[in-house]
Image (cartoon, rainbow, N blue to C red):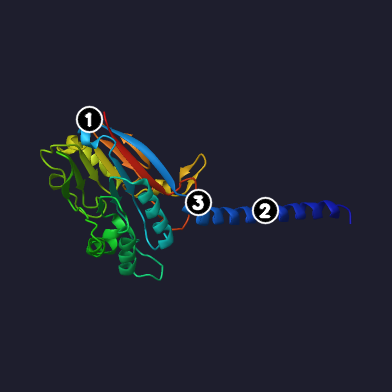
Amino acid sequence: MPGSRGDNRSLFSRRQFILGSGVAAAGMVLYSGEIARHELDTVRQTIPIANLPAPFHDFRIVQLSDIHLDEFTEPFFLERVVKHINALKPDLVLLTGDFITRGSLTFLSSRHAAHRCAEILSTLTAPQVYAVLGNHDVAVDASLVIGALGSFRIPVLVNQHVPIERNDARLWLCGAEDPGTSHPDLDLTVPAKPDGPVILMAHEPDYADTVVEHPRGPLVDLMLAGHSHGGQIRLPFAGALILPPMGQKYVEGHFRFNQMQLYVNRGLGTVGLPFRLNCPPEVTVLTLQPA
């Protein structure tokens, strides 16, 4: 019939396009779910701090955040990350929350996931390791996560501060209760008259605006946060598809305020879907230097 050859070509072209699109989509799912999700990025950031005591020059802190075991971070991946951190030989490791996932669909119970996560983290070889809770930890059971980490001698700071000492000098490490789900109290968290630099851990990065406005905000030199996952899935030109509450303004990386600096870690795990795209999981190496 007249025109049938052209119709067949058009139909074949449409089928080719649909088939090609399906293959491309499947490839993207495979890449973002199995490859990109495990492509660990080690980010090195120098942090200049005014009046940094000489014993803390070149002091190295590794930050790890948003592990989300076992949905969807597999134990083998966390074990690999811990070995990588140990090879970096940091002076201090700081864990900024979300060790497990609220509403996990995996077969592992929250109790088992919290215990397994803490067990793997206990193999960190840094001289000191401290943690704060994230919104998922609190939503599941704050006491469960604190107990699991504590059973492996990983202290969790909840509106508390502790000194980190070297020779006769010190800096103050502070940990706020999760700002997104709880009631952080900066009057308790930050010492009133610190005799050294102050580092604050708080899970949600947008809490930085509250910190800088607080009377003790000017005492904080550096705040460390996670929570946003850096957007987790970032499309070219469009950026992050979804950002959580209190993680929408300061999404990833280094920010400066008046006195305080903020660093937002992209996290290790994922939530919602086991995908990362243009947003690799992150281990951060922060090196303190005198300003």
**Local secondary structure at mark 1:** loop
Residue 20 - label? 2
**Local secondary structure at mark 2:** helix
In the figure, is residue 84 to the left or right of 130?
Answer: right
Residue of label 1: 50
Q: Nearer the viewer, residue 156 or 23?
A: 156
For residue 261, which quarter of the picture? top left
For residue 71, which quarter of the picture? bottom left
Marks 2/1: CA–CA distance: 57 Å
Q: Nearer the viewer, residue 166 or 1?
A: 166
Tag 1: amino acid: Ala
Check if mark 3's residue and mark 2's residue have beta carbons within 8 Å.
no
Q: Residue furthest right?
A: 1
In the figure, is residue 17 to the left or right of 51?
Answer: right
Residue of label 3: 36
Within 10 angstroms of label 2, few (less than 14), some, or many (20 or more) residues?
few
Check if mark 2's residue and mark 1's residue have beta carbons within 8 Å.
no
Percent position of residue 29, x then y = 55, 56
Tag 3: amino acid: Ala
Marks 3/2: CA–CA distance: 22 Å
Percent position of residue 30, x then y = 55, 56
For residue 223, which quarter of the picture? top left
Image quarter of the N terminus: bottom right
Percent position of residue 49, x then y = 25, 32
- The residue under the point 24% across, 61% down is 142
Marks 3/1: CA–CA distance: 38 Å
